[in-house]
Amino acid sequence: MNVYSQVQSNRTRTYIIMALFMVFIATVAYIFGQGSGEGLSWAGLALIVSGLMNLGSYWWGDKMEASRKDNFDFYTVAENLAIAGGIPKPKLYVIDDTAPNAFATGRDPSHAVVCATTGLLDKLDRRELEGVIAHELSHVKNYDTRLMSIVAILVGSIAFLADWFMRSLWWGRGRDREDRGSSSSIFLILGIVLAILSPIIATIIQLAISRRREFLADASGALLTRNPDGLARALEKISGDKEVLEAATNATAHLYIVNPFKGKNFGAWFAGLFDTHPPLAERIKILRSM
């Protein structure tokens, strides 16, 4: 599969996953509404809350504090690739950490930030650095940073609705369910089951979208540099480094080019569902096949 088909394939799959995610959210909201006796008001509430929070993430998603240090290769590589990609050069920041890694954030290409660790800048050569920065700029150009902020808000909305539904049962809402026949009881049971499972399902969908956007950024970055091997070599070096990124948290792990929590591999078949990144071996194999 060539670079162009990789880009299109990953974009299409992301659209499909996002469409299914929105259907899932609307279905959960509807069942919660029927189970609580509030009807479609739950769905409307979900859309309003999600919309307002998405608006907030759009305007404030790029406000991240970081100390800045000048670095010639980092600066010039980002500048050259931004010109090649037709986007403004993002603000550049350096994280003082010896573990090699990088990430991008910001609501759009005009308000983007790319951060790299000192470990990444010290351990990669210029070609490898180009591959990493091209990957991060591809996240910016593909609006992945905005998309993942929105997805995170939607996942939070699901958890919020699930919690609200369970609390509504204790508050005594919908006490007339008994008078409305068995359908209300069915929705009540479904609502309780979804209140338990929907946050887990939403998180799995979020991580699936994150993994798909990593594949897309790999392909888009390779298209930008015309050198897939540079990123493949960089991923090999980063994965071979055993240092754990101290600055990373569970909330930010999905942002990085490689999972910052190294060595946490589980043998269970379902473990991959909860990974923020696709397997490095698979990413490298695809890059080398381009």
Image (spheres, rainbow, N blue to C red):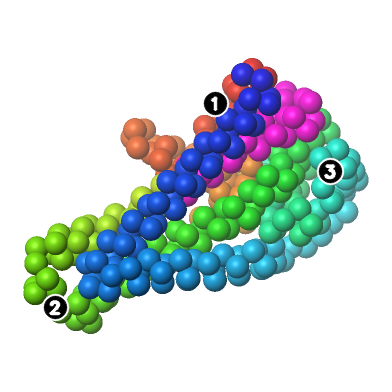
Please give the range of residues in magenta. 206-234
Q: Which residue is mark 1?
A: 282
- Eyeballing the image, is 107 above or below 51? above
Closer to the eye: label 2 or 3: 2
- Eyeballing the image, is 223 above or below 160? above
Label 3 amino acid? Gly
**Residue 170 highlighted magenta (yes or no):** no
- Which quarter of the rendering shows the N terminus? top right
- Eyeballing the image, is 175 above or below 97? below
Whether residue 104 is visible to the viewer of this picture, yes or no, is yes
Could you classify mark 2 by the number of other residues whose Cα lies within 10 Å: few (under 14), some (14-19), or many (20 or more)? few
- Disc tally is 3
Element type at mark 2: helix
Q: Which residue is mark 2?
A: 176
Element type at mark 1: helix
Could you classify mark 1 by the number of other residues whose Cα lies within 10 Å: few (under 14), some (14-19), or many (20 or more)? few
Horizontal placement of 140 versus 80: left or right?
A: left
Give the residue furthest to the bottom.
171
Residue 113, given in percent of the width and then of the height, sits at 75, 56
Q: Which residue is mark 3?
A: 86
Q: In the figure, residue 130 lies in which quadrant?
A: top right
Residue 66, given in percent of the width and then of the height, sits at 74, 63
Sequence-wise first label, 1 or 2: 2
Residue sitting nearer the eye, 125 or 61:
61
Sequence-wise first label, 2 or 3: 3
Closer to the eye: label 3 or 1: 3
